[in-house]
Amino acid sequence: MPATTGLKIVYIIGLPVAGFLIAVLFLGLSRKITARIQRRYGPPLYQPIIDVVKLLTQKENISHGLLFDLGIVLSLGGAVITVVFIPAGGIYPLSTSGDFLVVLYLMLLSPLGLALAAGASANPNASIGVSRKFTLALGYEVPFLMAALAVMTRFGTTSLVEVVSSQQGSVLAWGLFVLPLPALATFLVLPAMLGIRPFDFVAAPQEIASGPLVELGGKYLAFAALQGALHTYIVVALFVDLFLGGAANMLTFFAKMLAVFFVGVCINAVLPRVRVGQALRYLWKWPTIFAFAGLVIATITRG
Amino acid sequence: MREEELSNAIQATIESATATVQKPGRLVASVPKAAATSALIFLKARGFEHLSAVTCTDWLEQGEFEIVYHLWSYQDKIHIMLKTRVSRENPQMVTAMPVFRHAQTYEREIHEMYGVRFEGNPRLTPLLLDHWQGPPPMRRDFDTRQYVEETFGSTPPAEE
Amino acid sequence: MDREEILKILKSPANWGQKYSLWAVYFCTGCGVVEIPPVITSRWDAERFGVLPMATPRQGNLFLITGYVSVKTLGAIIRTYDQMPDPKYVVGFGSCPVNGGMYWDSYNTIKHLDQYLPVDGWIAGCMPRPEAIFVAVVHLWQMIDKGMAVGYKRYRENYDYYQRNQRAVLPHLPKFDLSQDALVQRSR
């Protein structure tokens, strides 16, 4: 619903806070659910809070220069700003036409910031991790952008708010049923966008000593972890808004996000890690075919 | 049987060699130092294609190092220990690399641990020890306990 | 979570964080590391204690020296320990770091780990069982609460002593000057 300026400011400040809370809850939930799937008890749900408190209260924070610090700040800042642009329930303080394109652009700020920091840390493991990250991004951006184009064509708008409101009414108006092929394509690349198994080779602890995060400790790691959690929030919220009808209030929105996230955690707990070449071959085959077919169908039915 | 055949052949072909059959599938042969390489070539041609290891024993009282080549024959399923003796003062030996390339690492270890120089081995650099300054540690006249006391500090003996 | 717990958390959130989130550097020092995979997998789940294995020393704050420490490994351990940010805890695992253990008369292993690194606690055994590791973790929590787990401070204050001992067995280790460490920004 359109809001007065005062309410908008409240939303602009409150939405990232809500995003942080949901993101941290998702972090804890993922560890707990993974533990239960692996038939053990796992840490308490508030364990990510303990981890972040530990990282922020560390007495030494080892920095590698100004670019290192700025990269981390850029990465977290980019994620926070992206959160404000994605409609969450009935809250969309900064909606304009074209804000979908703005979101797609802002989503690239976080990996860029992390790449800056990783480059400044001068560790070969970090460079390998960054190259893997950008290769993976190349892999999932192709089908995802085609699916996004299909959504924009079908609903005739580049504003996320209008995409959400076009899906209100009945369940059959959801993007899932109106655009089944792009929805299927996005669902197939969702693990790649979230950075979970089978596509978690970016920060592979066993192979490249945590990739871009290898030189991050103390508060830098806290910021990187928060950025990762916010990225999960952004991707899941985007999926809910594009294909699951968004929501009219925060509670329904959170419930839908929880459902998508739960499916992601189950996939992460069960599947192994694939190699970079295998990932690209997978991402550029069926998801791209489905997304392209969906885009063609959307263009034809629109006209 | 094959072992007897081989032991007789070794004694006949290589001069001053002795060969005995320990049990079925096990041969022990002793050759002088100068005949070691020809013995290896002879055995390799007879089917002993696999060099399992090269080891060294320190005969302190006799003043000699004994270099032992462990060879295995896939076709006869026989293991032979080929022993040679090297003097303890200025110990040196010809390398077995022309016959078995991978003897390089075993000879490297023997050089580090016993101090035996292998002529022709291009890589007699330290393998396991880190910036070792003392005498070769596997020699029997190297007092480990005294070295440990000096370098790492003493450990009080366990109470009986 | 009773009132005492909550009061403790409010008094010192740093202690609460350090205690319940001990990230162990996954450095497989010696043969004792064979006990670590059972501890971090499903049967003896260490994640419920907050203990996770970390691939890089920059992210770890617990260093388990598992098993014997040969002289070559000691160099790597010292370099890893120096990279970890404060506060960091070292636990000697098994009887070899304590007094040389099974290798008490070996020319190539060090006998007393606390001559070279500040050790906060020892776990006896050859190898200790996973239950012993959990007892040690709980003990470390109590030490952190009382402010007794200050090995990292001892290292800084007595760096000359440790450096002398380290260079005695590893003469080629480069000299560090802890006061001039440009990489480290201390936020106290």
Image (tube, helix red, strand yellow):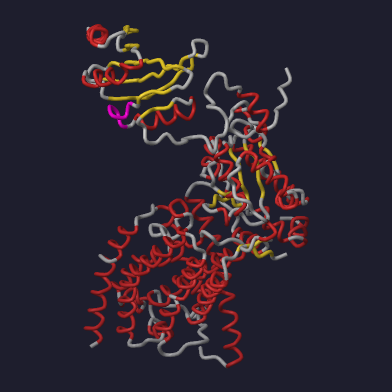
Question: Looking at the image, which residue is at 51% across and 61% down?
Answer: A213
Please name whichever residue, A179 or C89, is drawn nearer the observer in this view of the structure.
Answer: C89
Please name whichever residue, C17 or B71, is drawn nearer the observer in this view of the structure.
Answer: B71
Image coords of residue C40 (percent x, y): 54, 45
Question: Looking at the image, which residue is at 57% across and 56% down?
Answer: C59
Image coords of residue A215 (percent x, y): 54, 60
A183 lies above or below C9: below
Image coords of residue A12 (percent x, y): 57, 83
Please name whichever residue, C138 or B87, is drawn nearer the observer in this view of the structure.
Answer: B87
Q: Is residue C140 left or right of residue C40?
A: right
Q: Quadrant of residue B132?
A: top right
Q: Is residue A133 left or right of residue A118?
A: left
Q: Quadrant of the C terminus of chain B?
A: top right
Q: Residue furthest front?
A: B90
Q: Quadrant of residue A101?
A: bottom left
**Magenta segment, which residues?**
B96-101
B89 lies above or below A244: above
